[in-house]
Image (cartoon, helix red, strand yellow):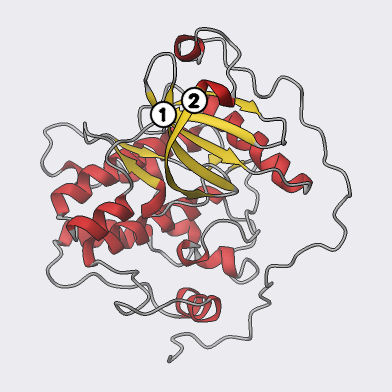
Amino acid sequence: MALVHRRNSPKLRLPEISDHRPRFPVPLPANIYKQPSTSTTTTSVAGSDNITAGDFEKLSVLGHGNGGTVYKVRHKLTSIVYALKVNHYDSDPTTHRRTLTEVNILRRATDCTNVVKYHGSFEKPTGDVCILMEYMDSGSLETALKTTGTFSEANLSTVARGILNGLTYLHARNIAHRDIKPSNILVNIKNEVKIADFGVSKFMGRTLEACNSYVGTCAYMSPERFDPEVYGGNYNGFSADIWSLGLTLFELYVGHFPFLQSGQRPDWASLMCAICFSDPPSLPETASSEFRNFVECCLKKESGERWSAAQLLTHPFLCKDMEIC
């Protein structure tokens, strides 16, 4: 692969596994798995504030998310179907912190219509943490791409607006998702688009701080996530979500990951070279000028040049068919 930019070899860090993990888990706050005291709690699901694994019947495996397995379950008393994510027990304190963060984010986002709704959580005797969420009956965008083919621009406009509404809500509350990709965007039978899987998400500080750890899916990582020293150092994690959004929409339009040929299997080294050194990918000529420009606003190599989620909601690609945007 020809390199577009000549520069010194980047100081890239390969993911490492610590040899100094503690032998015992770090305890979490005792009340973390209690349901929030609002009308959206599991009180209406289980008839009380205490839900357990025995309250549900497993129907099927929906997928595997960050740190756990997601099941389709049915509540035995009400017969209502939910999604249940089981975060498997791990003595690593980092895993415990991520589970704590995931639950806290879902609890805070219960009033956002473009984030999967949280219905409660509980801990099993084995140490597994279970998170109960609404069941999205039309599956993920990844599944839709495989079963029905590429998306039209009209459908992509709807998808983009839903994701951006969710990201605008999250970013305004200093939450970076850090793993936007087709498999983490779900749709229901009402065609509502919702962001899922907050297993590697992060609360950002009051000031901008780096998200330079290798979490999430590396294929959708922004250049500054791979090589933070070269691409700006103190960047904000929100712009990395925008890069991932751009790649997601691009993939749904062409049918394959943008930086690879159709059918090509990615590896870490080839992805790093393509994302860090190549120019951003360009949509085919069949794409409209509005859609082409929208994706370009997402895929700026310099994170500070990318449009924010709120700005993208005013882009002509989303507004051309609306009287008010």
Comparing marks 2 and 1, which lies closer to the viewer? Answer: 2
Observer-nearest residue: 6 or 203?
203
Quick check: 211 above or below 70? below
> Residue 196's x, y, as percent?
44, 41
Kindly identify the amino acid type of the residue bearing the numbered disc 1.
Tyr
Tag shown at residue 56:
2
Tag shown at residue 280:
none
Secondary structure state at the residue bearing disc 2: strand
Quick check: 67 above or below 6? above
Residue in the picture at 48% in, 64% down: 302
Observer-nearest residue: 103 or 324?
103
Whether residue 317 is visible, yes or no, is no
Residue position for label 1: 82
Answer with the quarter of the image where residue 61 lies: top left
What is the quadrant of the N terminus in the image? Answer: bottom left
Quick check: 275 above or below 102? below
Residue in the picture at 64% in, 34% down: 129
* Mark 2–mark 1 CB contact (< 8 Å): yes
Question: Which comes before the other along the chain, label 2 or label 1?
Answer: 2
Kindly identify the amino acid type of the residue bearing the numbered disc 2.
Phe
Residue in the picture at 41% in, 77% down: 265
Q: Residue furthest bottom?
A: 2
Whether residue 278 is visible, yes or no, is yes
Tell me if mark 1 has few (under 14), some (14-19) or many (20+) residues whose alpha carbon lies within 10 angstroms of its own: many
> Residue 217's x, y, as percent?
51, 60
What is the quadrant of the C terminus in the image? Answer: top left
